[in-house]
Image (cartoon, grey):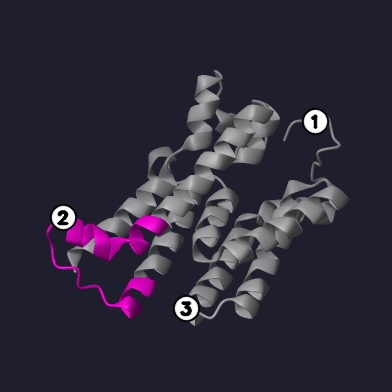
């Protein structure tokens, strides 16, 4: 049973991959010293550029998706290595949940950057997509609608993170996955607590603003 624990460690390290930091360095800046200090796609978009921000989102999405996919294929990987594929389905679901949570934690608390990273939105979307792609698309639709109305990424992210658990409990038959998405989304919203404070104070930047964040 050592193999799934190895995959859990890999999930954390995947989540920890400092995409935004590296993209910032390639542009000649330390993204942590600009705007919000986050290494996430939004801060990179605002301080490095649109293409850089999109690139960070795609890679961070992939981190979450790969962490889940690799754990989902754990028995196949064991067989491919000539080992006994003996992870029970009910146990595998728990390991998948663990991989997803560790990917989120890795992104927000990366070992390479002194445990200060992003807010796990893109990585969370990747995790959610692998658990239930219809819920992921529906949650992303909520993000798009709220973004069109308020032009504020944090409001859109919090709205999508609020909608995702409701959608999971409605559309997903796996109770364990639904519980995980609920906890994961609460974690993502908690990571936005400084944004929530700025929203309440009326100082949160929008994409209508020319200021950098």
Q: Which image quadrant is residue 182 in?
A: bottom right
Region of the chain picked out in magenta, as a range: 69-94
Q: Which image quadrant is residue 58 in?
A: top right
Q: Residues within 10 Å of mark 2 (few under 14, many from 20)?
A: few
Q: Is residue 122 above or below residue 101?
A: above
Measure how far apart labels 3 and 1 are at the Cα level: 42 Å
Position of the N terminus by quadrant: bottom left
Query: Of residues 183 and 133, which is closer to you in this image?
Result: 133
Which disc, if any, is residue 96?
none
Question: Disc 3 vs disc 2: which is toward the camera?
Answer: 2
Q: What x and y, as percent, mark residue 209?
A: 85, 35
Q: Main secondary structure of the magenta part?
A: helix
Q: What x and y, as percent, mark residue 202?
A: 86, 50
Measure how far apart labels 3 and 2 are at the Cα level: 29 Å
**Residue 156 lies in magenta, yes or no?**
no
Residue drawn where x is 49% and y is 60% of the image: 130
Which residue has dot 2 on it? 81
Marks 3 and 1 in Cβ contact (< 8 Å): no
Which residue has dot 1 on it? 211
Which disc, if any, is residue 176?
3
Query: Of residues 116 and 179, which is closer to you in this image?
Result: 179
Q: What x and y, as percent, mark residue 163?
A: 70, 68
**Residue 83 lies in magenta, yes or no?**
yes
Q: Tag 1 or tag 3, which sits nearer the N-term?
A: 3
Question: Disc 3 vs disc 1: which is toward the camera?
Answer: 3
Position of the C terminus by quadrant: top right
Q: Tag 2 or tag 3, which sits nearer the N-term?
A: 2
């Amino acid at each position: 049973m050592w193999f799934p624990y190895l995959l859990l460690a890999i999930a954390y390290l995947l989540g920890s991959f400092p995409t935004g930091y590296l993209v910032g360095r390639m542009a000649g800046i330390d993204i942590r010293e600009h705007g919000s200090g986050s290494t996430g796609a939004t801060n990179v978009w605002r301080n490095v550029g649109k293409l850089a921000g999109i690139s960070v989102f795609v890679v961070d999405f992939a981190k979450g998706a790969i962490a889940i996919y690799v754990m989902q294929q754990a028995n196949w990987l064991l067989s491919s290595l000539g080992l006994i594929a003996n992870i029970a389905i009910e146990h595998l679901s728990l390991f998948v949940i663990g991989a997803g949570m560790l990917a989120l934690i890795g992104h927000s608390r990366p070992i390479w950057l002194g445990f200060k990273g992003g807010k796990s939105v893109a990585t969370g979307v990747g995790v959610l997509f692998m658990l239930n792609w219809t819920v992921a698309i529906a949650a992303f639709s909520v993000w798009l609608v709220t973004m069109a109305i308020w032009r504020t990424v944090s409001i859109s992210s919090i709205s999508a993170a609020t909608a995702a658990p409701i959608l999971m409990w409605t559309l997903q038959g796996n109770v364990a996955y639904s519980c995980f998405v609920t906890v994961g989304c609460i974690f993502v919203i908690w990571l936005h607590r400084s944004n929530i404070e700025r929203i309440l104070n009326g100082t949160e930047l929008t994409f209508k603003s020319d200021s950098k964040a």
